[in-house]
Amino acid sequence: MGVFDSFKELVTQKPVGLKKPDFYKADSDAKKQLERLQQIHATAPDRVKPQIERDMKLLAYGIAGEESVAFELNNSYLPIIVLHNLRLEHEGLTAQIDYLIITTKFCLVVECKNLFGNLEVNSRGEFIRELDFNGKRKKEGIYSPVTQNVRHMEMIKALRLGKKRNPLMRMALEKSFGDFHKSVIVLANPKTVINLKRAPKNVKDQIIRSDQLIDYIKRLLRENKDLASSEKEMYEMADFFVGLHKENTVDYAEKYLLSDSGEVRDEAVEALPDRVEIDITETPIYQALKQYRYETSKAEGVKAYYVYNNLQLEAIIEAMPRNLDELRKVSGFGEVKCEKYGDGIVEIVGRYKDKIHR
């Protein structure tokens, strides 16, 4: 590298002559949230610690999955730009993208899943997880990560089109979007057994393990016959998305109903559960939410877990959302699901809020 290139790299903070992965955005909201939870847990009352510990465990597990992907990318020696933990917003909707990988030929949206248990995808493209629960095998539906990534892609498309004022440029982007933007689901847990025998081809082709990611990228690069983007164009795209990133801020004191001193607020004492002694599935609110899910799914002609699955049902009871804004903070409840089912869920929570766990 010459003197001019060294000076240019120092000024722009961008490597000249990209020869290996550049983690252009490497920070993680999840790590910041975990650090905050650890701080709160140290001084929180015993009654809320089980809930905090559960949230910490989920965050740590998700972080571990994303770090396994980062390891593969770091050791690939591919000339790519990596954006980690990208949170985008558009017209009231939110997309949390685990990794956005910018190559010379395409942009890859990576959804990382670090799942417990085994995974099956049936002929309808439905995702079914099998778990060992108290010595028994239990199957449950989970929200399709393929569908999740479709939403991410649609938001990226809307954001990019919003920057194109020229009708011809908008038309060109519309036409080429699917060729340039790719989607992949990466399963990070090496112990997960994946059954894709009956999965539709378009779904099967998007699901890989973390140790297959680099070969997957290399294959797409080989098969793509389009002209390569310049390094300047790659960084312009990276800057575009980094500029749109919105940090995810969670008010944990409000979530756990803690006062400024770290104590449980008076109005929260009745609502806080003792999760060691109570089987949540036996509570009236669980049964009411389950019945609402059943009736709603029948009316819509869909599987019950499309409304919300069992983990999401339990998360509702964990959070006890008092309004739609609080429901949106519950994992799995985006704008669309809140709009369709939010009022019914909040009404049920309000009905049982003073009765649960007494």
Image (tube, rainbow, N blue to C red):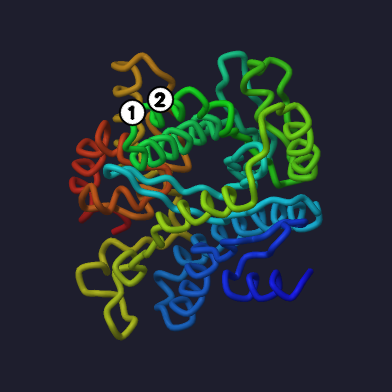
Mark 2 burial class by Cα count in 10 Å: few <14, some 14-19, many 20+: few
Circle 1: element type: helix
Q: Report if residue 219 is visible in the image.
A: yes
For image coordinates 38% across by 54% down, the residue present is 318
Measured from the top left, where is residue 278 in percent x and y? Answer: 43, 54
The disc placed on residue 171 is 2
Q: Report if residue 337 is visible in the image.
A: no
Measured from the top left, where is residue 109 in percent x and y? Answer: 57, 41
Q: Disc 2, disc 1: CB below 8 Å? A: yes
Q: Which residue is mark 1?
A: 167
**Viewer-closest of 76 and 294:** 76
Q: Is residue 214 above or below residue 141?
A: below
For image coordinates 38% across by 27% down, the residue present is 168
Mark 1 burial class by Cα count in 10 Å: few <14, some 14-19, many 20+: few
- The amino acid type found where label 2 is placed reads Met
Q: Is residue 262 above or below residue 288?
A: below
Measured from the top left, where is residue 33 in percent x and y? Answer: 47, 67
Image quadrant in which you'd find residue 282:
top left
- The amino acid type found where label 1 is placed reads Pro
**Viewer-closest of 196 and 298:** 196
Q: Judge from the rendering whether residue 198 lies leftward or rightward of residue 161; answer left or right.
A: right
